Image (cartoon, coloured by chain):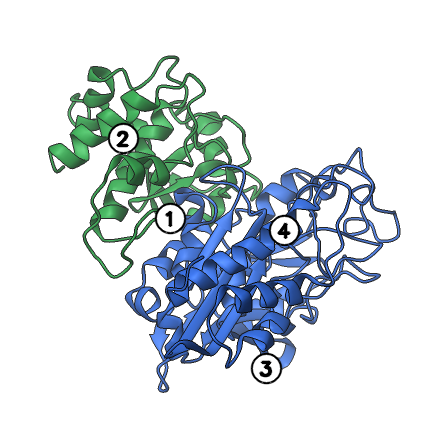
Chain colours: A blue, B green
Amino acid sequence: MIPFTYARAANTADAVVHGSAAGAKYLGGGTNLVDLMREGIEHPAGLVDVSGLSRDITETDNGGVLIGAGVKNTALAENRLVRTRFPVLSRAIVAGASGQIRNMATVGGNILQRTRCTYFYDDTGSRCNKREPGQGCDAIDGFNRIHAILGASPSCVATHPSDMCVALAALDAVVHLEGAGGKTRRLPFTDLHLLPEGRPDVETVLEPGELITAVELPAQPMAARSTYRKVRDRSSYAFALVSVAASLEMDGATIGDVRLALGGVAHKPWRAWKAEEVLRSKAATQATFQAAAEAELADAVPLKDNGFKIELAKRTIIAVLGELSGVSA
Amino acid sequence: MAIRINGTDVQAPSDPRVSLLDLLREELHLTGTKKGCNQGACGACTVLVDGERVVSCLALAVQYEGCEITTIEGLSKEGALHPLQEAFVEHDGFQCGYCTPGQICSAIGMAAEAKRGVPSHVTDDLSTDTIVLTHDELRERMSGNLCRCGAYNGIVAAITETFVEAGE
């Protein structure tokens, strides 16, 4: 690891001042960043420790929840409001990483974690446009079983590894940001991460020095009926091949409203807008679920090794909708 | 500010690159905590920070100023092993022993999580505050600790005896 400076931020304003310096990076729990620094992939000049800031989870006036960016993953998963009003979020978090890592990792850090593409990690042996813009991508023609089927580009086929973020995408979460000069703004979570296009090294719309201070979950009554299903190579402590987060509101035998997001399939947590469109106000039947899954995956492009993910994503969507609606095959 | 390790105050390292694991092993010679993968995958370096289990390899020591760290060396009291250590001996919860300190620290943190109602991936009812540490719950909650000898049956038996049957 190359030398760097370390500063513990006293408050958000202090953090942003330090975080705006050249080469500075924010440090949460360190579970991803420290590893990447050790691997020589991240080499910040200075770390600004924001893990002690904003560690509260509070109920908002309208029945939503405001989650400080420094809240640990375990604390979020075990929170009673989250468990009862937004169970999909608790389920997504405990489907990810290990008990130890969930005790360290923060909400902000989870959101900004980097891909686990093996070519991205292979600093000495592989080309990667995300690590070294313009270098080329060895994953596209390489061993790409875990890579993206939606929204990829000729520059990058990496996936976003988070489970928590898939739930946040389904929950219409809003990200609270603070930047230079105390400038604050709010952003729909689904607008935070970018697709790779020609610049896979630029992963979010965050401005230099801009800090995630909180994530807000607006009230979503139907989220009381929500869940997360993750398909992976091992039953525990493995990244998703495909995952589905969903909330469902039934109106008799008809789908009143629905939120659906996919993980393991794209460069960002993938909100399934097309499937939702197909589902709303339709009879909750296997045929409807199938049509929604087909619509969402219509644009999917398989690579050499990951074609199975297209069918797997469809089946997982159908299974989750069946579970939430009580309509099974 | 110091880091309190097994009851003794220790100065945080001046070089922020030093991991909590390297501080323990290389500077304090507390070599019970093991460096397995050094990338957060194996759990051999698990210690307790203010009672919560973490992997010390991914922890920069400077981040833990003001915290209380307990390692495997800090578990015995007045020369007597912790009940879970006794149970590991009793149930053959190890073969080579390399993962054992991490397994034991992790299990102690895990039991505290279950006691306060933290759900796991295999918890059916998210609304409950009463977690029963069944075989499946234990295996899921301990999945961050690998044992390459495959002593899992003994490990589960030792944890079950200590935290489920004896209600420690």
The relative height of residue A191 versus residue A231 in the rendered view (above or below) is below
Three-letter code, disc 4: Glu
First of labels 2, 1 by sequence position: 2
Task: Please tell me if label 3 and label 4 are on a single chain.
Answer: yes
Q: Secondary structure at mark 3?
A: strand
Three-letter code, disc 1: His
Apparent side of residue A47 relative to residue A255 in the rendered image (left or right) = right
| Circle nearer the viewer, 3 or 1 | 1
Q: Secondary structure at mark 2?
A: helix
| Circle nearer the viewer, 4 or 2 | 4
Task: State the residue position of label 3.
Answer: A185
- Residue at 48% from the left image edge and 61% from the top image edge: A107
- Residue at 42% from the left image edge and 16% from the top image edge: B149
Task: State the residue position of label 2.
Answer: B74
Task: Please tell me if label 3 and label 2 are on a single chain.
Answer: no
Of residues A34 and A109, the one nearer the viewer is A109
Task: State the residue position of label 1.
Answer: B121
Write down the chain letter for disc 4. A
Task: State the residue position of label 4.
Answer: A311
Q: Position of residue B131 (x, y in %)?
A: 22, 48
Tell me, yes or no, whether the two marked residues, 3 and 2, touch with CB atoms within 8 Å. Answer: no
| Circle nearer the viewer, 3 or 4 | 4
